[in-house]
Amino acid sequence: MGSVRLRYIREKLWQMKPNHLFLLLLTWILVSSCSPRLTPLDQRLIDKNNWGPAELQRIQFYLSQDIVLRRQAESAQTSIKNGKIRYVNGEKIEEVIFERGTPGVVLFSPKENRLAVSFEQEGKDAFLMFGPNPKFDNRYVLLGKEWDRHSGIVTYNGKEYTTTSGSAFSGLLINLKQSRVVEKNTRVPAGRKLD
C-alpha cells in the first residue's frame, strides 16, 4: 500500500506546472530552514562553550519528552495550584504534566553539574533538577531522589512526587543558533581634527 501511495504522489508531482512545483519546493525549504534545530544539552557542550551559571541562565531550554508527576492529594487540600486532580483507583491524585517541548529557564545551580530549571512563571520552588547522566552520553536529564525499574521520586514545589522510570531520560534541549552568547562592543569614533 505504501508503494501505491508513493506512486500516486510522484504522478501528481509530475502533473504539476513547473511554477507550482517551484513554489511547493520553495515553501518546503523555507519551512524546514526556519524551524529550530534542538540539540540535547550535555556536559561536553557546556565545557566546549565555557558556559557558567550566568550564561546558562540566559539560554532557553526545552523538554525532550513528557514528564508526568503524581502524588496522593491530601484530603484537607481544597485547591491545587500546579496540577490537576484525578481519581485513580478511588484515590485522589494530584498530577503535574510537563509536555515535550515545554520551554524552561535555569533559576540557579546549587552545585557543579546541577541545574534547577523552572517551567512555570510563579513559585520559587517550582523547578525540576537536571544533571549529566554518564549512562546517557552525559546529557542533562531529570534527576530524582530515588529511581528503581518502574518509578522515581522527584521533588517539585517543595513536595515529593512519583514519576515513571521513563522520565529519567527526559532531558534538556537547546536551540544552538539562539544559545550563542555574543558580546558585542560597538564604538563610533567622532573623528579627530588637527589642533
Image: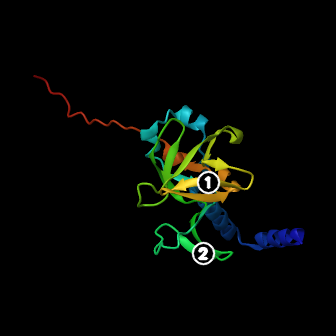
Name above or below for residue 2 compared with residue 154.
Answer: below
Asked if residue 91 can be seen in this view, the reply is yes
Q: Label 2 near label 1: C-beta < 8 Å?
A: no
For label 1, the crowd category at 10 Å Cα-Cα, with few meaning under 14, some 14 to 19 and many 20 or more, is many
User: Which residue appears at 87% of the width and 69% of the height?
Assistant: 2
Q: Nearer the viewer, residue 168 or 186?
A: 168
Q: Which residue is mark 1?
A: 153
Residue 15's place in the image compared with 129, above or below, is below
The residue lying toward the viewer, choosing from 153 and 115, is: 153
* x and y percentages locating residue 131 in the rendered image: 58, 42
SS for dot 2? strand
**Gap in Å between the C-alphas at discs 1 and 2?**
19 Å
**Where does the image place residue 104, in percent across and percent down from the top left?**
50, 55
**Colouring convention used in this rendered image of the protein:** rainbow
Decide: is 3 above or below 158: below
- The answer to whether residue 103 is left or right of residue 137 is left
Residue displayed at 56% across by 74% down: 85
| Residue 49 appears left or right of 194 | right
Seen from this angle, which residue lies furthest left?
195
Can you give x and y, in whole percent of width and height, for residue 171 in the image?
A: 62, 50
Depth check: give the residue in front, 191 or 29.
29
Residue 63: numbered disc? none
Of the numbered discs in the image, which one, if any, rests on residue 86? Answer: 2
| Type of amino acid at the residue the image marks with label 1 | Ile
Q: Residues within 10 Å of mark 2 (few under 14, many from 20)?
A: some
